[in-house]
Image: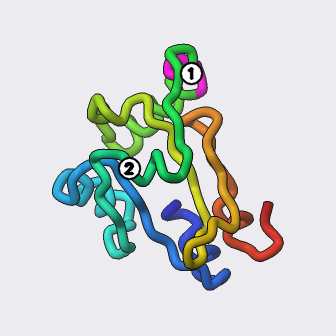
Amino acid sequence: MAAHRAELAATGTPVAFVHGVSDEDAEPWFAQAGLADLPRVSDPDLRHYRAFGLGRAGLASLLSPPLLARGAVCALRHGAGPQPAHLRAQMPGVFLVHGDRVLRAYRHRQASDRPDYVALARADGP
């Protein structure tokens, strides 16, 4: 996400994050990623995840080569450690929301998916 900040800003779309840990636990990750200045919501009970229809990954998905490779890259490049147990199978998503309407959504099929954030933010996006 940090690599696309300038492009996202050019679309005029504000960015916010919902994460499944305490603000205290999330702060170092957001700071390291260069995203500490963006708004975020702590949701350790995963209520927002459920409200947006984000499911949980099955065992086969958690052991898939793309996910294992992505995890290795994150660990080596960013020093990311293991996720808390309640998040390990939680699938992420990206949503363009206006008021109380979801205009566009990307619900990950695999946790290793990398959606096109800029296309989602553009008016002509998917």
Q: Looking at this view, is 119 or 43 the one in front?
A: 43
Dot 2: within a 10 Å radius of its alpha carbon, few (fewer than 14), some, or many (20 or more) residues? few
Q: Is residue 19 above or below residue 73?
A: below
**Which residue corresponds to the image point at 43% horizontal and 39% vertical from the top-left?**
74
Q: Position of residue 42 (x, y in %)?
A: 29, 58
Look at mark 1 in the image and give the residue it sits on.
61
Dot 1 amino acid type: Ser
Q: Which residues are magenta?
A: 61-66
Pointers 1 and 2 in contact (CB under 8 A)?
Answer: no
Q: Position of residue 59 (x, y in %)?
A: 50, 15
Between tags 1 and 2, which lies in front? Answer: 2
Q: Looking at this view, is 43 or 11 the one in front?
A: 43
Dot 2 amino acid type: Arg
The answer to if 37 sits in the magenta stretch is no
Q: Position of residue 43 (x, y in %)?
A: 31, 53
Q: Is residue 65 above or below residue 42?
A: above
Q: Position of residue 94 (x, y in %)?
A: 58, 56
